[in-house]
Structures are given as C-alpha cells and as structure tokens.
Image (tube, rainbow, N blue to C red):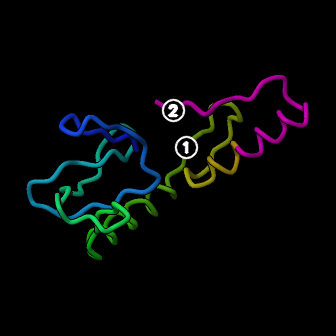
Amino acid sequence: MPVFSRSLGVNGVCDAVEFRASSKGIALAGREGGWLPVPVEYKRGAPKETGAVLMDDETRKIILVAWQKKKQEKITHPMLGEKMEWGLVPYSQALLLARYLRGDLDAYPPFLWK
C-alpha cells in the first residue's frame, strides 16, 4: 500500500497495514470496483516502536472475513479463459511466470482486471 505524509515530506510502500474501527472512517477498496463497508481511522500517536499502528480484534475480524469472501468469488481469467476463484489468481500467475521462465511462453501475460 503506497503511503505518504506531506507534513513530514516522506513517502513509501507498506507491506502490511493495520486499521482501527471508526464511525467516521473511510471505505477500503474491495469488491470489483466497489468498497468494503469497513470504517477505519489512523490513530495518530499510537504506533509501536516498529512504526506499526494497532488494529483491534473486531476490525481485524471484519477485514479477514471480507477477504475470505472475496477469495471465494469466481472470475474468468482473462488469458486462460477459465473460471476460477480470486484466491487462485496469484497461484495461476506464478504458474504462467514459471512457464515463461522455462521458455514455454514467448511473454509473461500480466493479470489486468478492471
């Protein structure tokens, strides 16, 4: 997740991000161009020594349940033309990359989804 702070003049990419529940929070990107109904807020001043921001158990459960549901949704892979669950997309892309590296494919077909 790309992050930045204009006030501090820094930017970067986070490998993992934790959120806190908030009634005035923001929507998280999720379902095929829609949004997950998970209100969140960054609690300034609550980072641990590592810079991590804590997420309470209730919010963590909401996000994990939404992710598990998302992984079960079926799509048609744009290159393979096969129906598969979202959760299998990284695996299928890894197989395509392996085929490209072995020379079985002329080019690696990136997964592009609208």
Look at label 1 and name its amino acid: Ile
Q: Where does the image place residue 57, in percent across and percent down from the top left?
A: 29, 76
Query: Of 8 and 103, which appears nearest the observer?
Result: 8
- The numbered dot on residue 113 is 2
Look at label 2 and name its amino acid: Trp
Q: Is residue 101 above or below residue 91?
A: above
Outermost right residue: 103
Q: Is residue 60 magenta?
A: no
> Which secondary structure lies at badge 1?
strand
Dividing the picture into quarters, in which one does residue 56 lie? bottom left
Q: Is residue 105 magenta?
A: yes
Q: Where does the image place residue 24, in percent across and percent down from the top left?
A: 9, 54
Q: Where does the image place residue 68, in percent across and percent down from the top left?
A: 46, 63
Q: Residue drawn 55% across and 50% down? A: 86
Q: Residue drawn 69% across and 42% down? A: 93
Q: Is residue 93 above or below residue 67?
A: above
Quadrant containing the N terminus is top left
Q: Residue drawn 29% across and 49% down? A: 28
> Which secondary structure lies at badge 2?
loop
Outermost bottom residue: 57
Total labels drawn:
2
Q: Is residue 24 left or right of residue 84?
A: left
The reply to whether the C-beta atoms of the residues labelled 2 and 1 are less than 8 Å apart is yes
Query: Of 82 and 90, which appears nearest the observer?
Result: 90
Q: Where does the image place residue 48, in percent across and percent down from the top left?
A: 30, 68
- The numbered dot on residue 106 is none
Q: Which residue is mark 1?
A: 75
The region drawn magenta spans 94-114
Q: Is residue 14 left or right of residue 35?
A: right
Dividing the picture into quarters, in which one does residue 101 lie? top right
Q: Residue drawn 23% across and 54% down? A: 37
Badge 1 crowding class, 10 Å Cα cut-off, few under 14, some 14 to 19, many 20 or more, is some
